[in-house]
Image (cartoon, rainbow, N blue to C red):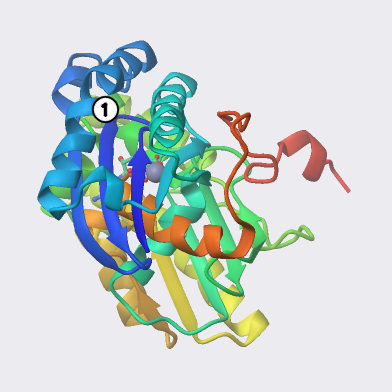
Amino acid sequence: MLVLGIETTCDETSVGVVRDGKEVLSNIVASQIKDHTPWMGVVPEIASRLHLKKITPIVEEALKKANISIEQIDLIAAANRPGLIGGLAVGVSFAKGLSWITDKPFIGINHVEAHLYSPHLTCEIDFPYIGLLASGGHTLIVKGESYTKYDIIGTTIDDAAGEAFDKIAKHYNFGFPGGPALEKIAKEGDVSTFDFPISNLYKTDRKFDVSYSGLKTAVINHLEKYLKKETYTVSDIAASFQKRAFDILLKKIKLATTTFGINTVVVAGGVSANQYLRKLFNENLSAKVFFPELKYATDNGAMIAGFAYHKYKEEGKSPFNTGVFPRVEGFKISLEENYRCR
Ligand code: KG4
Ligand code: ZN
């Protein structure tokens, strides 16, 4: 079965063609990085307009690269949640239009679920697994039962992991996007320079949740101290933060694998591109750890197409009145609801 997957949730217009959920025939990514760099952050309106401009040529390019005509495609998939509403509307409207005129089924895909699928594109992974999804908008820990079924066991109670990287990088002027820029600077630094605070949510009944806002604020507030008394480098700050940020995730994943007796770990989302994270997990978990290939770590159409194949086999197509949703219920919890003083 040939699936066309469209991803427009944030600042990449990406389209992939994948056969049977596994064989990637093409995966074209048009990045908007240079368009958002002057603002050191993604500007939603600019993103929507660029998706609109790029969607047709990128779909054409993906089909051409795959050497597939639109008539040969069996299913048209588009990410319809969560993400920036304008970008989602472009991708989903395009997919529905294409589906209508070609008489092929359309399916709306949760792009976070597709991230968790991304390591499956290139690896054979046993179920159940403990999954970590760390992106710019979400940090989820799940117990995965199949390609499409999972239970959320933990999430962030405030900032996502990638968001902390992005905000710190912006504050310190490390570059855009913040994650890879900070990782590059951290390579020159000493991880043991600072003991930045680590959140302790173990005493609540949601022991797999994480928090990044305290750590992020501590690192941001450190800039003034640094400017007054530069006895260390910004690389030391970046390295110490990065270590702390990933220690938090390592601790929770370790706890999840032992709690559930699961020996397989899947790590996905943009943050999973980080080499320090990969090394830390590989060296400190006794479980087998799977990461996506780097080109499938950040947003991409191939993961949408790959995941859509399994979703469609299980649940069939989506109706044409399927909407777009910037948020997904259950992916984030509110501090007020879950962490009232007990
Ligand atoms: O999955 P993704 O492409 O988009 C979202 O769904 O958010 O993830 C983007 C996030 C951004 O926060 C970006 O800074 C972060 O992933 N990221 C990284 C790295 N590459 C991307 N964070 C840390 N280290 C990296 N190498
Ligand atoms: Zn994403």
State which quadrant residue 92 falls in.
top left
| SS state under label 1 | helix
Position above or below: 1 against 10:
below
Residue displayed at 40% across by 65% down: 267
How far across and how far down the image is residue 130, in percent?
54, 73
Residue 231 in sight from this viewpoint = no
How far across and how far down the image is residue 30, in percent?
18, 34
Give the camera-side residue of 202 and 109.
Answer: 109
Give the camera-side residue of 209 and 321.
Answer: 321
Q: Is mark 1 within 8 Å of ligand 2?
A: no
Residue displayed at 73% across by 59% down: 206
Quadrant in which the N terminus is drawn: bottom left
Position above or below: 8 against 40:
below
Tell me if 53 is positioned left or right of 255 in this view.
Answer: left
Position above or below: 3 against 247:
above
Position above or below: 170 against 280:
above
Label 1 crowd (10 A; few <14 / some 14-19 / many >=20) = many
- Figure disc tally: 1
Residue displayed at 44% across by 44% down: 104
Residue displayed at 18% across by 36% down: 60
Give the camera-side residue of 215 and 7.
Answer: 7
Q: Type of residue at label 1?
A: Ile
How far across and how far down the image is residue 111, in percent?
46, 46
Tell me if 259 is positioned left or right of 291 in this view.
Answer: right
Q: Quadrant of ligand 2?
A: top left
Tell me if 229 is positioned left or right of 303 in this view.
Answer: left
Determine which residue is flagged by label 1: 55
